[in-house]
Image (cartoon, rainbow, N blue to C red):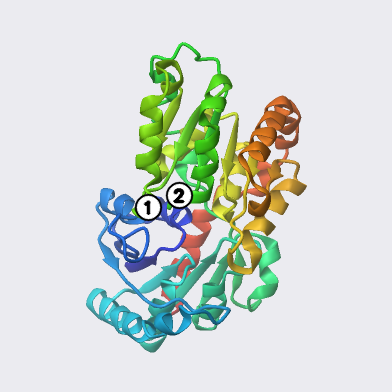
């Protein structure tokens, strides 16, 4: 069997990759760099390369909901993306395509339809991602993570599989804990701060203003991303160097936390500060962690706010809107969550069942059936 995995959402893709039969030939198609026009390698590319899985870069235009100054330049890239996709497919000759959302899958799916190669899509969100909605007419099957997504896709194609959780969440990995430093404050609670694989400049800037105050009462693991434009990691590294040793030892700063290490970071943390992408929300529920969420304000269809509201309704999160987020507001929420952590832990007891541990197995079974019926 020859399969192309199209990235977009790395965590569920990796969960499926971990369980694919060893005799399958795999090609991963995704983005090589964090941001267009920069030369900072993406976590997606680094992770797939570490796994020794062949990686093919593709670049294409984004289909946008609103007309902006970037709309026409982006549309002009669509033909080259389609012809690049055709080239990839003709060279690799896959039996099937498995796409995990994101605009990069669009030219691959269109080219697959042209070449009559079956496609399976996976939808992580509570509703429907823009790319999956566009691609769904050409897909054989659409695997959804939540029942609420079913109304957005044809009933005959749609299967509830759940959102795959990686083994790094289910079985804690060998992440080097912050306690391995020489800090004497080993009993301090730990906050895990993450802006996702690309990082969040806004979130990094908020934390930067609070670090000297936070480290008096907390240890912090801070994942910044690696943007060349903002240089957050470099700037925060300089800040860390200037801290007293006692505080410096309680601040673990990193550009990326590899997907296989996220489980340990979650396990150690008292709570999390993050954006509210659906895979982050899924992992928080499974790992039984409460969070302070600052949704990305310009996410598609206000998706991140909906994800955050979902977690808030379960009693697992505080939400701070980005337009209201100041260092003072964030610090107040941190203090409130720390004081109320036992109440949050009570709420966390009953929600692990929302996440299906066998989601990756179910997706692979759907893939197999589509190949057999093709």
Residue 343, relative to residue 18: is it above or below? Answer: above
Name the image quarter holding residue 289: top right
Q: Which mark is residue 199?
A: 2
Q: Residue at x 50, y 29 (%)?
A: 220
Q: Secondary structure at mark 1?
A: loop
Can residue 171 be seen in the rendering of this structure? no
Q: Position of residue 200 (x, y in %)?
A: 49, 50
Q: Nearer the viewer, residue 256 or 138?
A: 256
Q: Position of residue 263 (x, y in %)?
A: 48, 37
Q: Position of residue 323 (x, y in %)?
A: 66, 54
Q: Name the outermost residue toward the top.
A: 184
Q: Is residue 21 left or right of residue 13?
A: left
Q: Position of residue 364 (x, y in %)?
A: 46, 61
Q: Is residue 301 left or right of residue 260?
A: right
Q: Is residue 114 left or right of residue 188?
A: left
Q: Secondary structure at mark 2?
A: loop
Q: Are marks 2 and 1 in contact (CB under 8 Å)?
A: yes
Q: Which residue is mark 1?
A: 227
* Mark 2 or 1, nearer chain start: 2
Residue 255, relative to residue 53: is it above or below? Answer: above
Q: Residue at x 30, y 84 (%)?
A: 83
Name the image quarter holding residue 25: bottom left
Q: Residue at x 49, y 43 (%)?
A: 204
Distance from label 2 to label 1 (Cα)? 8 Å
Q: Which quadrant: the C terminus?
A: bottom left
Name the image quarter holding residue 107: bottom left
Q: Is residue 34 left or right of residue 144?
A: left
Q: Residues within 10 Å of mark 1 (few under 14, many from 20)?
A: many
Residue 316, relative to residue 308: is it above or below? Answer: above
Q: Residue at x 64, y 40 (%)?
A: 291
């Amino acid at each position: 069997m020859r399969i192309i995995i199209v990235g977009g959402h790395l965590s569920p893709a990796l969960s499926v990759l971990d369980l694919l039969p060893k005799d399958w030939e795999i090609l991963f198609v995704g983005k090589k760099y964090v941001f267009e026009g920069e030369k900072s390698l993406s976590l997606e590319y680094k992770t797939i390369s570490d796994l020794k899985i062949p990686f093919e870069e593709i670049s294409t235009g984004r289909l946008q909901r609103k007309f902006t100054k970037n709309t026409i330049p982006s549309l002009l890239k669509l033909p080259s993306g389609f012809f690049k996709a055709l080239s990839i497919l003709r060279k690799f000759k896959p039996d099937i395509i498995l796409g995990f959302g994101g605009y990069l899958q669009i030219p691959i799916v269109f080219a697959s339809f042209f070449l009559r190669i079956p496609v399976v899509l996976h939808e992580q969100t509570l509703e429907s991602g823009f790319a999956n909605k566009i691609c769904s007419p050409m897909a054989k099957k659409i695997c959804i993570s939540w029942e609420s997504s079913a109304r957005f896709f044809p009933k005959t194609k749609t299967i509830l599989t759940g959102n795959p959780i990686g083994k790094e969440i289910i079985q804690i990995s060998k992440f080097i804990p912050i306690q391995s430093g020489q800090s004497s404050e080993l009993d301090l609670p730990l906050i895990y701060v993450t802006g996702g694989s690309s990082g969040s400049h806004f979130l990094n800037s908020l934390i930067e203003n609070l670090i000297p105050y936070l480290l008096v009462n907390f240890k912090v693991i801070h994942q910044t991303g690696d943007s060349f434009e903002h240089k957050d990691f470099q700037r925060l590294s300089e800040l860390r160097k200037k801290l007293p040793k006692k505080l410096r030892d309680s601040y673990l700063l990193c550009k990326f936390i590899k997907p296989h290490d996220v489980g340990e970071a979650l396990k150690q943390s008292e709570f999390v500060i993050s954006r509210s992408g659906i895979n982050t929300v899924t992992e928080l529920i499974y790992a039984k962690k409460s969070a302070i969420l600052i949704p990305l304000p310009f996410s598609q269809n206000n998706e991140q706010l909906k994800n955050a509201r979902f977690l808030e309704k379960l009693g697992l999160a505080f939400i701070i809107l980005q337009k209201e987020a100041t260092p003072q507001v964030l610090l107040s929420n941190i203090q409130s969550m720390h004081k109320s952590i036992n109440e949050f832990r009570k709420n966390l007891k009953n929600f692990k069942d929302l996440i299906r541990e066998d989601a990756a197995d179910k997706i692979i079974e759907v893939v197999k059936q589509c190949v057999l019926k093709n």
